[in-house]
Amino acid sequence: MKAAVIIPSRYASTRFSGKPLALINGLPMIRHVYDGAKRASLPEAVIVATDDERIFKAVMAFGGEAVMTAVDHPSGTDRIFQAASAPQYNKYDIIVNVQGDEPLIRPDMIDAVIELLISDSRAGIGTLKKRITVQNEFFDPNIVKVVTDKDGFAMYFSRAPIPYYRDLMTITRDGHILFNGNMEQVQYYKHIGIYSYRKNVLTRMAGLKEGPLERAESLEQLRAMDNGIKIKVGETVHETIGVDCPADIEKVEKWLNTYS
């Protein structure tokens, strides 16, 4: 099976306009994401899908591959679908969505989500999870939690702390959850937002409408689950730092200067 990585990259952003071209250690962020993806072993191609000529030209300038897409896509999945539908990319059976604001993406994480689809024909989408070891993370609605069945398939994704440990938690009268245990007693997993799609599943996803679960949690992966698409979840020990605002650049640079 042939696989390709497609990196959706928009210039406009409510919190950080021009984010893909923000410099990290002197190089644009999109370069860090692209180079990380290129180091993966299983993909045969890495393509940036963008709506802006400035990003397109920046990628071409460092020798990368890029394709222009429409400016009005409602999600990164729709942008990836347009790019994957181009005649030159029809040969790929598996498409990996690597977010353009993940400059610390590791190549083995990309290989892992591809392998999830190669090794299990039941899976339509592959993604990753990481064990939560810091208590405040499972109460943080910005950190998405996932629970899986015994075969590693996602049962649900939520911004809430799931599962609820009845013997270790108490709900107060004002609706707050108190945790009365320690981290060794619980198994919480955060979702790591990298996806692999079978080509036919990506095509199907592009035609599906938002459902009540997705609308409630604002999580697009629930659209797939709501329509019976099975998501296989592998476990990783690696952390990532997504760039949502200018302050996150400093965090990424600190990590790179310390560990790379």
Image (tube, rainbow, N blue to C red):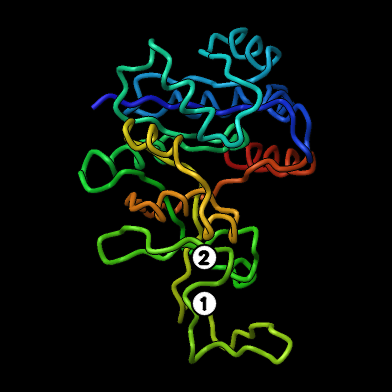
The residue that appears at 58% across and 41% down in the rendered structure is 259
Give the image location of residue 99, x and y in percent.
55, 35
Q: Amino acid at mark 1?
A: Met
Give the image location of residue 203, x and y in percent.
38, 32
Which image quarter holds the C terminus? top right
Q: Which residue is mark 2?
A: 132
Visible residue check, residue 232: no
Q: Is residue 239 left or right of residue 11?
A: left
Q: Is residue 216 left or right of residue 21?
A: left
Give the image location of residue 248, x and y in percent.
73, 43
Give the image location of residue 244, x and y in percent.
71, 43
Which image quarter holds the N terminus? top left
Q: Amino acid at mark 2?
A: Ile
Q: Is residue 152 left or right of residue 12?
A: left
- Residue 20 drawn above or below residue 156: above
| Secondary structure of residue under mark 1 | helix
The residue that appears at 49% across and 55% down in the rendered structure is 191
Tag shown at residue 57 = none
Visible residue check, residue 146: yes
In the image, 156 versus 178, the foreground residue is: 156
Badge 1 or badge 2: first in the primary sequence? 2
Q: Which residue is mark 1?
A: 183
- Is mark 1 in CB contact (under 8 Å) with mark 2? yes
In the image, 165 versus 69, the foreground residue is: 69
